[in-house]
């Protein structure tokens, strides 16, 4: 079992209705040791009927150049226990978590050169963390990030996201797609392929967000010549491989 770590809420900002940006400072002197693209698992301490404790993953969207502070953004998902808990945190409160976790980052087998990141919905947090990361900047200069989102006010404002990428020179393109849960979501995106994605695909591809879009996209990329080993996927929701709801 992972040893719990603690971070204190330093600042909370309401970005827009149902979207909250939370800045944390680590309790204790040890650096977090995360790489851009990784996530933490928050232990809310809340108990579900049946006794299971609510633990939820949140990707770090701040740059890995600061290992003592980090930021996450949380979208309220209906009356979901995890996201509503995160929206009620107050400044000074200490939060137990584990991590960093995840392989959504360059590794020793990564193909160097410009990469394509595709984020859907809240998956933009993992994409922002990744694109601002030191390892990504070294491996993938001149990359492109495509954000597939249903409306400009869905989560973080696109211009805010773009401003985070300036330092690392990754270009952001925002494409409006059908909302999560729409049965035609993937099909419509695949139909509009030429309008959204680069004609020539080579090198590394990073996909984060809605599994209902990411898995069909991953298949479409491999059908167009991308190697499976060069595609990294971080599924936030609609994960076909998730066995039990938590
Ligand atoms: C690796 C990883 C990183 C994540 N990072 C973030 C992040 O940075 N910011 C963030 O807001 N969330 C993020 N999530 C989602 C988060 O972990 C929770 O699933 C979310 O906060 C809802 O939890 P809940 O307890 O409120 O609702 P639940 O009752 O657990 O959720 C209800 C259902 O909604 C689904 N769901 C979760 N998010 C969405 C969404 N955006 N649109 C539609 N359905 C959704 C859940 O999978 C679940 O099936 C991440 C998930 C993973 C696996």
Image (spheres, rainbow, N blue to C red):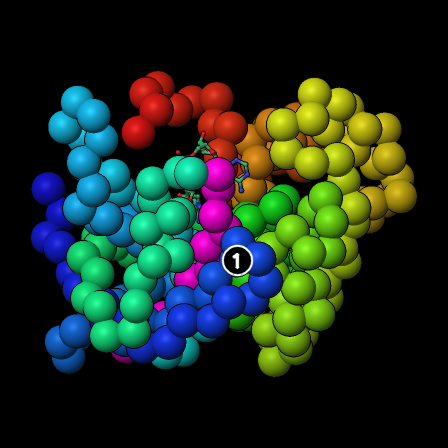
| Residue 188 falls in image quadrant | top right
State the quadrant of the C terminus. top left
Point out the stretch of residues depicted in magenta: 67-78
The residue depicted at 88 percent of the width and 39 percent of the height is: 194
| Residue 48 falls in image quadrant | top left
Percent coordinates x, y for residue 37 in the rendering: 45, 57
Which residue is nearer to you in this view: 109 or 45?
45
Taking 48 as reference, is 93 above or below it? below
Percent coordinates x, y for residue 231 in the rendering: 57, 40
Task: Report whether residue 29 is seen.
Answer: yes
Residue under pointer 1: 19
Percent coordinates x, y for residue 242 in the rendering: 39, 24
Please tell me whether residue 36 belongs to the stretch shown in magenta: no
The residue depicted at 14 percent of the width and 28 percent of the height is: 51
The residue depicted at 68 percent of the width and 56 percent of the height is: 153
Q: Residues within 10 Å of mark 1 (few under 14, many from 20)?
A: many
Taking 141 as reference, is 51 above or below it? above
Q: Is residue 239 left or right of residue 171?
A: left
State the quadrant of the N terminus. top left
Circle 1 SS class: strand
Taking 53 as reference, is 196 above or below it? below
Which residue is nearer to you in this view: 201 or 38?
38
Q: Is residue 52 left or right of residue 223?
A: left
Percent coordinates x, y for residue 159 in the rendering: 71, 70
The residue depicted at 70 percent of the width and 21 percent of the height is: 183
């Amino acid at each position: 079992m992972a040893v719990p770590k603690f971070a204190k809420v330093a600042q909370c900002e309401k970005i827009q209705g149902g979207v909250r940006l939370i800045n944390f400072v680590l309790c204790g002197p040890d650096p977090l040791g995360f790489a851009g693209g990784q996530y933490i698992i928050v232990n809310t301490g809340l108990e579900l009927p049946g006794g299971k404790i609510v633990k939820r993953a949140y990707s770090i969207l701040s740059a890995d150049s600061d290992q003592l502070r980090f930021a996450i953004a949380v979208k309220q998902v209906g009356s979901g226990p995890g996201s509503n808990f995160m929206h009620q945190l107050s400044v000074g409160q200490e939060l137990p978590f584990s991590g960093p976790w995840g392989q959504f980052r360059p590794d020793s087998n990564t193909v160097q050169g410009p990469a394509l990141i595709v984020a859907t919905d809240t998956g933009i947090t993992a994409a922002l963390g990744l694109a601002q990361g030191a390892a990504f900047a070294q491996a993938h200069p001149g990359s492109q990030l495509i954000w597939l989102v249903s409306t400009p006010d869905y989560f973080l404002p696109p211009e805010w996201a773009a401003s985070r990428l300036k330092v690392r020179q990754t270009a952001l393109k925002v494409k409006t797609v059908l909302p999560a849960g729409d049965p035609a979501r993937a099909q419509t995106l695949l139909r509009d392929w030429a309008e959204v994605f680069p004609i020539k695909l080579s090198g590394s591809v990073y996909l984060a967000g809605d599994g209902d879009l990411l898995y069909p996209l991953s298949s479409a990329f491999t059908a167009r010549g991308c190697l499976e080993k060069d595609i990294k996927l971080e599924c936030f929701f609609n994960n076909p491989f998730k066995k039990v709801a938590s």
